[in-house]
Amino acid sequence: MSDSRYFHSSLIDDKSIASACKEHQADKFSKKLSFKDHLTTMLYTVFSGCTSIREVQAGLELCEGKLNHFNLTKVPARSTLSDGNKNRMSKVFGTLYQKLFEKHKAIISDSSMDKDVASKLYILDSTTISLFKAI
């Protein structure tokens, strides 16, 4: 299986994650939750439709035998995840998004959009929307 077609290449590469993390010093004051683990946990949250930190933790604990597929070594504690959400600057996530957009924009389909419409399109920063409203 040394053929390159068998290897999976992540759309969110470690180099982009490390670059955004370094640019914003996102791991400077975080001992228990790295930026990469925080990102992975938040992506799990979005893809699984979780609405609370308790639900995120429970869902990840159900996957505990398969955490290596998420590149997580352990499930973050609720308090650790809550602290990460409260203390980590959202700019690091925005910077990572920009890096990924620049890297993958050539493969993003825009063929169905009129150029006049596309020139008026704006992307809103979702960091102003609370992920966990009940908390």
Image: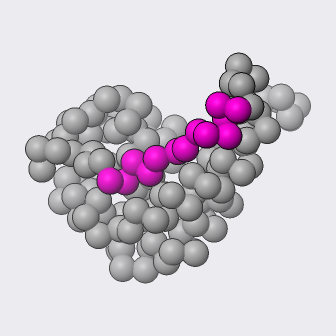
Residue 10 image offset from top left, x and y in percent: 66, 41
Q: Residue at x 66, y 47 (%)?
A: 101
- Residue 58 visible: no
Q: As rendered, which of 8 and 110 lies closer to the eye?
A: 110
| Residue 107 in the image: above or below residue 30 | above
Residue 95 image offset from top left, x and y in percent: 56, 61
Region in magenta: 116-128
Quarter occupied by the N terminus:
top right
**Residue 134 placement: quadrant:** top left
Membership of 99 in magenta stretch: no
Q: As rendered, which of 120 and 27 lies closer to the eye?
A: 120
| Residue 115 in the image: above or below residue 70 | above
**Residue 37 placement: quadrant:** bottom left
Membership of 120 in magenta stretch: yes
Q: Residue at x 68, y 60 (%)?
A: 15
- Residue 56 visible: yes
Left or right of 3? Residue 14 is: left
Query: From this viewpoint, which residue is outermost toward the front?
Result: 116
| Residue 76 in the image: above or below residue 9 | below
Query: From this viewpoint, which residue is outermost toward the right?
Result: 3
Q: Residue at x 48, y 58 (%)?
A: 93
Residue 81 image offset from top left, x and y in percent: 27, 57
Left or right of 120? Residue 71 is: left
Q: Residue at x 43, y 41 (%)?
A: 43
Query: From this viewpoint, which residue is outermost toward the top?
Result: 112
Residue 34 image offset from top left, x and y in percent: 43, 64
Q: As rendered, which of 51 and 101 lies closer to the eye?
A: 101
Left or right of 30? Residue 103 is: right
